[in-house]
Image (tube, rainbow, N blue to C red):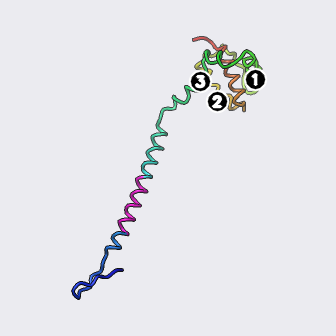
Amino acid sequence: MNRVIYEGNSYICLYNNWIKTQSIIKTTMRKQIILAAMGSAILFAACTSKKATTRSTEATTGEVKKNYTEADLADGKAIWQGHCNKCHKLFEPTDFNVNKWNKVLPTMTKKAHLTDDEAGKVTAYLVSNAKQG
C-alpha cells in the first residue's frame, strides 16, 4: 500500500487498489459480453430454418438427367434391388413421387450403409423413374 504524507497527517492512498479493481471489473465485463455474444450466436444458429439445407440435397429429374449417365442409373437399380429388399418389401419407383422419395431416401440410404456414391445412384434411379405429380 502506498502512503501519502500531507502536513503530518497520514492518508492511505487507495488509488492503486482502485486501478486494480477497475481492471478486474473491465476484464469480467468483457468475458460476460463475449459469452453473451457466443450464446446468442448459438441460439440464432439453432433457430434457423432447416429447409435451406434440405433443398440443396433433394434430387430433381432435371438434375438426374444432367448429372448421371445411363450406366449410373443401371448401377442405382442394381444397388436398390440388392440392398433395399433386405429389410422390407421392394417398393417400385412409381410407388412414390419425387418429393416422397426425397424425404424417404436420406434415412433409408443411411440405414442400408450405402456410400455417398451408391446413395446418389439409387436416388437418381428412383427419382428418374418416380411417379409424376
The answer for how far apart the CA atoms under marks 3 and 1 are is 19 Å
Cα–Cα gap, marks 2 and 1: 16 Å
Tell me: 84 left or right of 51. right
The residue to which callout 2 is attached is: 107
Closest to the observer, 133 or 116: 116
Q: Residues within 10 Å of mark 2 (few under 14, many from 20)?
A: few
Amino acid residing under circle 2: Thr
Q: Nearer the viewer, residue 29 or 87?
A: 29
What segment carries the magenta color?
20-33
Q: Is mark 3 on a helix, strand or loop?
A: loop
User: Which of labels 3 and 2 is toward the front?
Assistant: 3
Q: Position of residue 100 (x, y in %)?
A: 60, 20
Q: Which mark, residue 70?
A: none
Q: What residue type is labelled 3?
A: Glu
Q: Quadrant of the C terminus?
A: top right
Q: Provide residue 12's location: percent of width, then percent of height.
A: 30, 80
Residue 48 place in picture, x, y as percent: 47, 35
Residue furthest out toward the top: 132
- Which numbered dot is residue 58? 3
Q: What residue would you read off at disc 1?
A: 79
Crowd rating for badge 3 (residues with CA inside 10 Å; few <14, some 14–19, many 20+): some
User: Residue 23 lies in magenta, yes or no?
Assistant: yes
User: What's the CA distance linking mark 3 and mark 2?
Assistant: 13 Å
Q: Is residue 11 left or right of residue 32?
A: left
Marks 3, 1: nearer the viewer? 3
Q: Residue at x 69, y 32 (%)?
A: 111
Crowd band around label 1 with a 10 angstrom C-alpha radius: few (<14), some (14–19), many (20+): some
Vertical position of residue 3 compared to residue 92: above or below = below
Q: Kindly report which numbered mark, 2 or 1, lies closer to the viewer in this rendering.
A: 1
User: Quick one: SS at disc 1?
Assistant: helix
Nearest to the observer: residue 52 or residue 16: 16
